[in-house]
Amino acid sequence: MPELPEVETTRRGLAPAMEGKAISRVILNRPDLRFPIQSDFRARLAGRTVERIDRRAKYLLLRLSGGDVLVAHLGMSGSFRIEAARAPLETATLYREIPRLAAHDHVIFEMSEGARIVYNDPRRFGFMFVAADADLEHHPRMRGIGVEPLEPPLEPSTLDRLFEGAGTSLKAAL
């Protein structure tokens, strides 16, 4: 399972390809990942601009114009692949190799500038959903997430306060 550093690396890799760019189309190659994909998933994303990509715990948060957030969890084997925009065919070109759809490419985001962001997940333990930013902290999948270790910097006094009276080992409390 990708741990927090891998999710942060994924966030940093996706940011230049997605931030400030609009999602022109979403292709779903199956109706579910770990959980069913929302029926309005495509409609809530198409035409929206990705304003910023954040990370909260092991979740990627793609903050969209209009106040929605695309939440993505990589699960055990999920990953994103960035495919650069393809040059248009020239008049004299008779053949151009088109990459074959990988068997586990489940969600494809076509960006306004031609790039494609492909979510691949062989085991399908990952999931995605769209939620209103204002409701995100109350969403069932987001409730109960612990403190963020990187921002703001985690202080020993914070841990002391959180674990006070825990009555268990440090490893179990973490």
Image: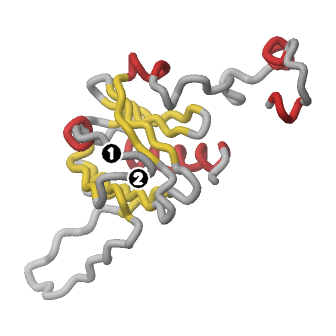
* Three-letter residue code for mark 1: Ile
Element at label 1: loop
Locate residue 91, reporting x and y percent.
8, 80
Residue 33 is marked as: 2
Q: Residue 161: x and y, percent? A: 82, 11
Q: Quadrant of the C terminus?
A: top right
Residue at mark 2 to residue at mark 1: CA–CA distance: 7 Å
On residue 61, which mark appears? none
Q: Residue at x 27, y 53 (%)?
A: 110
Which image quarter: residue 159?
top right
User: x, y percentage for residue 99?
Assistant: 31, 76
Residue 23 in sight here: yes
Report the residue marked by disc 1: 37
The amino acid type found where label 2 is placed reads Leu
* Residue at x 32%, y 72% (from the top left corner): 101
SS at mark 2 in the image: loop
Q: Is residue 115 shown to the viewer in this render?
A: no
Q: Nearer the viewer, residue 107 or 87?
A: 107
Labels in figure, total? 2
Relative to 161, residue 136 above or below? below
Against 9, is 134 above or below? above
Residue 157 vertical placement versus 77 (above, below): above
Q: CB under 8 Å between callouts 2 and 1?
A: yes
Which is more toward the observer, 60 or 115?
Answer: 60
Outermost residue to the left: 91
Residue nearest the viewer, comparing 106 with 52:
106
Q: Is residue 108 left or right of residue 81?
A: left
Q: Residue at x 41, y 46 (%)?
A: 35
